[in-house]
Image (tube, rainbow, N blue to C red):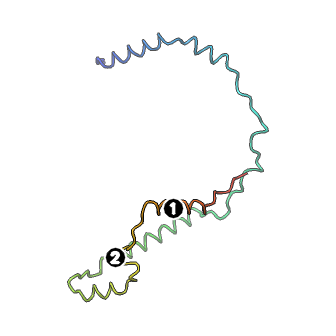
Amino acid sequence: MKLTLAHRLSVSLAVLALTSFPTHLLAQTTADAAPPQADINSMPKWSEFPVPPTNVTTAAEFQTDVSEALTKRTQLRTEVRALVWDNTVPENFAEARDRIDPAHSGPIETQTSPAQINALADELRKRAAPPPVVK
């Protein structure tokens, strides 16, 4: 095995670091330190743990739901591929556009300033409730 110059340098630096580090200080600090005392009374009791949920979806039910969703996606993709997209007849486009609620299709007319955005954020923060504390 041929050692490269970089390997030789890294090995020599590692040896130098190990020989020059005062390991006797490290050994003294770990020997002098007292082990932490365990307080059994501060540990949670089994009665304090939350009750496990009962309405958990089983793996088989989850697999069934996923399979149904994938089947519906495949059906929808097949139906969309079968559609004829014709943008050349303006009447069809206008008819489809007229079926859309104008409130959802128009541009936003109002401009919101950063001060209004901050006021809204402050109002939402005041209304927000923190999650309950688990005891």
- Is 28 on the left-hand or right-hand side of 74? right
**Residue type, label 2:** Thr
- The residue that disc 1 covers is 119
Asked if residue 79 is positioned above or below residue 36 in the image, the reply reads below
Q: Earlier in the sequence, mark 2 or mark 1?
A: 2
Residue 29 at what x, y percent from top left? 62, 16
Residue appearing at x 79%, y 38% in the figure: 41
Q: Which mark is residue 78?
A: 2
**Residue type, label 1:** Ala
Which is nearer the eye, 92 or 1? 92
- Is 53 on the left-hand or right-hand side of 42? left
Q: Measure the C-alpha gap from mark 2 to mark 1.
A: 47 Å
How many neighbours does mark 1 have within 10 angstroms: few (below 14), some (14-19), or many (20 or more)? few
Quarter of the image holding residue 36?
top right
Quarter of the image holding residue 31?
top right
Which is nearer the eye, 105 or 113? 113
Of badges 2 and 1, the one in the foreground is 1
Asked if residue 123 is positioned above or below residue 74 in the image, the reply reads above
Q: What element carries label 2?
A: helix
Residue 132 at what x, y percent from top left? 68, 56
Q: Is mark 1 on a helix, strand or loop?
A: helix
Residue appearing at x 57%, y 11% in the figure: 24
Residue appearing at x 30%, y 76% in the figure: 81
Q: Residue 25 carries which label?
A: none
User: The N terminus appears in which quarter of the rendering?
Assistant: top left
